[in-house]
Structures are given as C-alpha cells and as structure tokens.
Amino acid sequence: ETGVTQTPRHLVMGMTNKKSLKCEQHLGHNAMYWYKQSAKKPLELMFVYSLEERVENNSVPSRFSPECPNSSHLFLHLHTLQPEDSALYLCASSQSVQTPYEQYFGPGTRLTVT
Amino acid sequence: QQQVKQSPQSLIVQKGGISIINCAYENTAFDYFPWYQQFPGKGPALLIAIRPDVSEKKEGRFTISFNKSAKQFSLHIMDSQPGDSATYFCAASKAGGYQKVTFGTGTKLQVIP
C-alpha cells in the first residue's frame, strides 16, 4: 500500500449505530488530519494530530471522536450521528503541521446516515 | 476574513481551450496559495502552488497568476483535455507554526471533446 488509505470506502449507518473510520498513511509523515467534505462547501477541517497529539479540535460535535494511536494511524469513531453528518470524510497527512498545505489525501469514506 | 471565494462553481470547456478559475481572499497574512485537483472517488491532490512574491508560476499546462494588490489568484489550464475534467480547489495558508489551510468551495470542470 502506498500513500494514504481509508477504510471503509462506503458506510451506511443508522442514527443509533456506532462505527469507526480508519486511516493509514505510508509516507512517514508526522501530521494527520480529518476533514468533512460536503457538496458546494469548502473542506471543513475537523481534527489535526501532530505526532499522536491533537493540536486542533475545530468545534466538532462530541458524536465524532478521533483517536491517533501512532503517527501512521488515525481513527474517527462515530456514534449517534445525525442525517446532516452524511458527507465524504477525508483523511490527510503532511510531513509536519507546519506544512499543512502539502497534504496528501486519502480517497475518503462516503458516509450516509439514515 | 478567513474565507477564500472561488468562482465559477462549474465550468464547461471545449477540448484545446483555456480553463480559467478565479479565487479571492481577504486575509493579507496568507502567504501560500495551493491548488488541488480532485477526481471522482479520489481525495484532493496538490496540483501547483504559489507564494505572493511572484506574479506567475507555470508547470506544464497549468499556470497560476497572482495579483497581490487585488488579493486575487487564478488557475489557467492551457490546451484543456478531457482528462483534466475534475473538481479544482484553491486554498490559502499562512507560514510559520501550525496554520490551517482555508479552502475555496471548488470548481467542477468538464472538458468536452
């Protein structure tokens, strides 16, 4: 595997379910990011991790819970989501948080909340 | 003040034509302006970027033009090809320490044969 991988690619969940999104980067980067991408809106930065420490929590509802066990893996735990949370969730990594513009993105997880 | 405004929302260009996407920003502290290209089913990928100390940067068929006084920058795709059909995002960031990237809303480009 190369670059940034995300699993699953598609996820349908009910509002009472609990699920997790997984991201893995094979680039030796030290910073990892979660973004939400909705149609006709700018990418919304959700969380930023630098060397497994969270450096930004961008006013994200507590029903989204990130976890970064090491610099290569990032998870987004989901519970009691709302229909408006349906979106493409993108993971990205960069060499460091000081070069966020040189991010490498994964293909995303298309989440549908029913 | 953190917004980056992008236009048009969608664009249809004939093969061989020039595609032009425009962006404007308010925050004069921004000093790095990347463009990302996103194909369906893929995440965005860094395409080309410019710093405000130059007015133009060219990489192959892709050119960024930068107007610091007007706080505007644009992406030009010369000799547009069907394979260029994608969504393009402009963005802006500040150097130094941790500074998040502010993205535009995206332009969906379709190049027709």
Image (spheres, grey):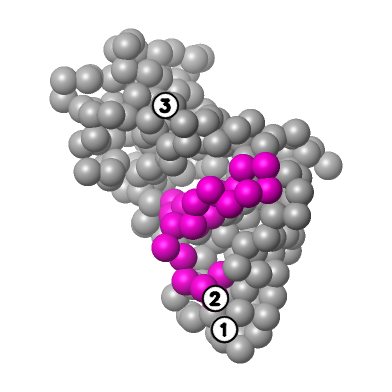
Tags 2 and 1 touching, CB below 8 Å: yes
**Residue A50 is one of the magenta-drawn residues:** yes
Q: Measured along the vertical axis of the image, is residue A34 above or below residue A26?
A: below
Residue drawn at x 54%, y 75% as measured from the top left: A63
Which of B42/B67 is in front? Answer: B67
**Residue B97 is one of the magenta-drawn residues:** no
Three-letter residue code for mark 3: Ala
Q: Give the crowd class for mark 3: few <14, some 14-19, many >=20 residues within 10 Å.
A: some
Q: Measured along the vertical axis of the image, is residue B20 above or below residue A55?
A: above
Find disc 3 in the rendering and name its residue: B95
Tags 3 and 2 touching, CB below 8 Å: no
Find disc 1 in the rendering and name its residue: A80
Q: Give the crowd class for mark 1: few <14, some 14-19, many >=20 residues within 10 Å.
A: some
Query: Which chain is mark 1 on?
Result: A
Secondary structure under tag 1 reads loop
Find disc 2 in the rendering and name its residue: A63
